[in-house]
Image: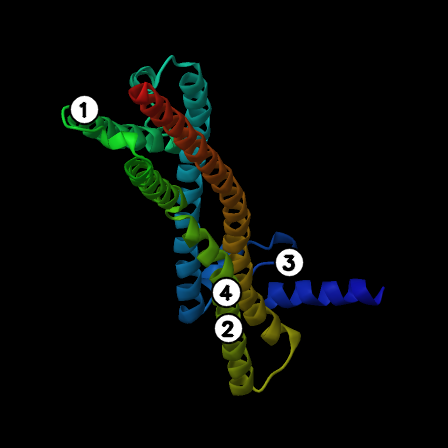
Amino acid sequence: MEMLKYFKLVDEAWAATPGSVAVSDLDIIPLILNAGPVVKGVMIVLLLFSVTCWGIIFAKLIQLSRARKQTGEFLDLFWGARNLSTAYHETRHLSASPVAAIFRLGYIELGKLMKTQVTGDSGDRDPLGTIAVRTAGLENVNRSLRRAMNTESGRLFRAITFLATTGNTAPFIGLFGTVWGIMTSFRGIGLKGSASLAAVAPGISEALVATAVGLAAAIPAVVAYNYFLSKVRELETEMGNFIHDFLNIIERDLLRRAQAGEK
């Protein structure tokens, strides 16, 4: 019964306050409009953070979905191709796949290596026939593949860190607005010389909206960041595995060519 009386008093206090609404009809819009300039500024900043985060979320959902789909398609075409040249021409349209981008750069670097072999065939010895030169050629391809992987990882991670920044800072920005609003409310109470519920409740309620807005911006950002991070890590694993397999294919091919030259 005491609790019911308390809520009734709160409702009456809100109804008696000019420009306020009843608790049963509580709406966030009047609370924002009645807030002070600093609290309004905080909520505008949080709104910009939230809008930016949702834009990033939708863009990354599309990007990562395409990347995962085209990566699966690329791996099927690559392992089903007769040779690397066929795989290169059959997968050129898969622009969203980071694994396909790595393969294209590795294939170009391998072409440069093969041109070196052709040049060596006209001299006294095949430069790919020696272990030292063959190892150097593999190292060049490996470095190119690793650079491509870093580039693709950077492209996938682009803008995701903003989600983490929002998740970490938005609650504190909202808390700043709340603290400032409560300070203003208590200052108003001191000037009026009244500490009744009707004088305290509206100001504190308006101040607490800033914290609520901060949490509303932070929670989706944190959830999306963790989700995207796991998906990017999966793609990085695919890239690393492909680099390892691709280097093994090149090494076996160079070894076969060297053995054929010795014969």
Specify which label sits upstream in the sequence, 1 or 4: 1
Residue that sits furthest to the right in the current view: 1
How far apart, in angstroms, are the residues tagged by discs 3 and 2?
20 Å
Label 2, residues with CA under 10 Å away: few <14, some 14-19, many ≥20: many
Labels 3 and 2 touching (C-beta < 8 A): no
Between 30 and 108, which is closer to the camera in this rendering? 108
What numbered label is drawn on residue 23?
Answer: 3
Q: Is residue 213 left or right of residue 2?
A: left
Q: Nearer the viewer, residue 41 or 219?
A: 219
Of discs 3 and 4, which sits in the foreground? 4
The residue indicated by pointer 1 is 121
Quadrant position of residue 24 = bottom right
Question: Which of the two discs, 4 and 2, labels the residue nearer the N terminus?
Answer: 4
Which residue bears the numbered disc 2? 181
Residue 174's tag is 4
Q: Position of residue 247 (x, y in %)?
A: 39, 32
Which mark is first along the chain, 1 or 2? 1
Q: Is there CB contact under 8 Å for labels 3 and 1?
A: no
* In this rendering, the label closer to the viewer, 3 or 1: 1
- Mark sitting earlier along the chain (3/2): 3
Of the numbered discs in the image, which one, if any, rests on residue 222?
Answer: none
> Of helix, strand and loop, which one carries label 1?
helix
Q: Residue 138 falls in which quadrant of the image?
A: top left
Alpha-carbon distance for marks 4 and 2?
Answer: 11 Å
Q: Which amino acid does label 3 sit on?
A: Val
